[in-house]
Amino acid sequence: MDPKKQEKQWLLNEKYQGIESPEFFEDFKKLESGTPLAYLIGNIPFLEITVDLEYKPLIPRPETEFWVNYCTQKYIPLEANISILDIYSGSGCIGLGIAKKRPNTKILCSDIKKENIVQIQKNIVLNGISEKQVSVIQSDIFKNISMQKFDIIFANPPYISEQRKDTVDDSVLLYEDHHALFAEDDGLFHIKNLIEKIPFFLKDNGYMFIEFDPWQKKLIESYIQEKEICFEFLQDQYQKNRVLIIQNKKLA
C-alpha cells in the first residue's frame, strides 16, 4: 500500500474508529500538509506503554524502541532492584517503558522543558505507573540532579548536526522540537558531555546507553578511546550503528 494511503487508513482507524467524519477530513488535510501522523492521532505505542503526545514532545522512533528493548532484556534482569536515569527524557517513553517491563527498578526521568515534565507526568498516570517507582525532575542536563550515582543511564540526546539539516524530513523540521533534535560540534555536544559526567553519575561497572547518528560512529570512537573506558557499539534493526554502550570501568 502507498505510505500516504496507509497513514490515512491508520488515522481513520485509530482516531475515528473508521468513521469518515468532517473532523477526520480536517485532520487528513493536516496529514497531507506534513503534520506527523502520531501528533494527529495523539499517541503512539512504545514497548508495553501508550505514549501520549499532547505537549508535542519528540515522537518516539522505532529504532529507539528496538535498542531500548534489547538493552532492557540484556542488561536488566526481570527482578532487578536498581536505579536508572532516563536523561533527555522527552515524552518519558524510555523510562516509563522500562518501568512497565521491570517493575522493581527505581527510575528518574529528567528533561529541560517544562512542557515535557508535564507530558511525562501525564504518561505516568495514563499507563498506571506508580509515582513511587518513577520520579520526574526538570533539569538542564545534570544541573538539578543531585550527585547520586545510577546503575544505568539511558540517554537519547539531541545529536543531529546542524550541517545535516538537509537529511531530515520536512515534516520533522516543520513540526518537531529543534532543541530535541540538533546539537553543535557535529551533533556531539551532548554526547561528549554525557561521557565526561560518567565518573560523577554512573556507579562502578554501571552502564550508559547513548543513541547517536550512524555516521558519527568514527568521531565518537576517536573521542572515547582517549578516555580509556570500556565501550562498544550496538546496531539497530536496520543494521546501522545506533547506540554507544559504555561500562564504567577501566580497560584491563
Image (spheres, rainbow, N blue to C red):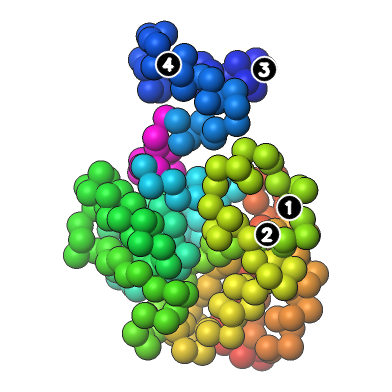
- Magenta-drawn stretch contains 42: yes
Residue occupying image coordinates x 52% and y 26% = 30
Mark 2 to mark 3: distance in Å?
Answer: 28 Å
Mark sitting earlier along the chain (3/1): 3
Q: CA distance from mark 2 to mark 1?
A: 8 Å
Whether residue 120 sits left or right of residue 216 in the image: it is left
Q: Give the mark nearer the N terminus: 2 vs 1.
A: 2
- 104 left or right, relative to 48: left
Label 1 Cα crowd, 10 Å radius (few <14 / some 14-19 / many 20+): few
Q: Find the residue positioned furthest to the top.
A: 20
* Label 4 with label 2: CB-CB less than 8 Å: no
Residue 32 placement (x, y as % from top left): 59, 23
Q: Secondary structure at mark 1?
A: helix
- Between the residue at mark 3 and the residue at mark 4, the CA separation in whole angstroms equals 19 Å
Badge 4 amino acid:
Phe
- Point out the stretch of residues depicted in magenta: 41-53
Write down the quadrant of residue 126 in the picture: top left
Q: Is residue 186 visible?
A: yes
SS for tag 4?
A: helix
Mark 2 touches mark 1? (CB < 8 Å) = yes
Task: Answer with mark 2 or mark 3, whichever residue precedes in sequence.
Answer: 3
Is 236 in front, or is 155? 155
Q: Position of residue 37 (x, y in %)?
A: 51, 31
Look at the numbered discs 3 and 4 and tell me whether their residues touch, using CB distance below 8 Å: no
- Contact check, label 1 and label 4, Cβ < 8 Å: no
The residue under the point 46% across, 18% down is 26
> Residue 205: percent from the left, percent from the top?
50, 83
Q: CA distance from mark 1 to mark 4?
A: 32 Å
| Rendered image: mark on residue 24 | 4
The residue identified by callout 2 is: 160
Circle nearer the viewer, 3 or 4: 4
Judging by the rendered image, the residue that carries numbered circle 3 is 2
